[in-house]
Amino acid sequence: MKEIKAYETSDGQVFTSSDQASIHEEHLAIFPIIDQFLNSKLNKYNAGPQRIIAQRTIANWEKWKDENV
């Protein structure tokens, strides 16, 4: 058996990478705002899988925009 280092995020998810845990925390912070948009009439992707893809894509876009623009 091998002991590993893990990172637990505020919602209880566990990651072995601090980078992945940080990205997840950033997503948790922005998801409420994104969900406001996804609940609006402007969003056409209301089904489960498409909604999740849209949510994560928007969150990643915001992160990319902050780092590159």
Image (cartoon, helix red, strand yellow):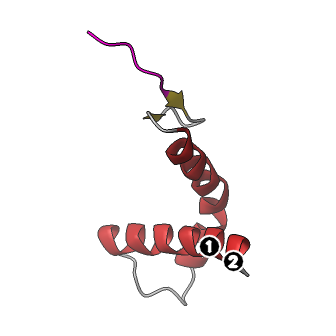
Q: Residue at x 38, y 13 (%)?
A: 3
The x, y position of residue 10, in whole percent, is 60, 35
What SS does tag 1 mark? helix
Coordinates of residue 41 in the picture (x, y in percent): 54, 88
Residue drawn 31% across the image and 69% down it? 49
Give above or below for 11 relative to 58: above
Residue 68 marker = 2
- Tell me the amino acid under the disc marked 2: Asn
The residue that appears at 54% across and 49% down in the rendered structure is 24
**Tag shown at residue 16:** none
12 or 36, nearer to the observer: 12
At horizontal 43% and vertical 88% (from top left) the residue drawn is: 44
Whether residue 36 is visible here, answered yes or no, is no
The answer to whether 31 appears left or right of 69 in the picture is left
Mark 1: few, some, or many residues within 10 Å (few <14, many ≥20)? few
- Taking depth in this image into account, of 64 and 45 the one nearest to the observer is 64
Which of the image's four quarters has the N terminus? top left
Question: The C terminus appears in which quarter of the rendering?
Answer: bottom right
Residue 31 covered by magenta stretch: no
Distance between mark 2 and mark 1 Cα atoms: 6 Å
Return the mark for residue 64: 1
Tell me which segment is drawn in magenta.
1-6
Above-or-below relation of 30 to 65: above
* CB under 8 Å between discs 2 and 1: yes
Is 57 situated left or right of 36 in this image? left
Q: Amino acid at mark 1?
A: Trp
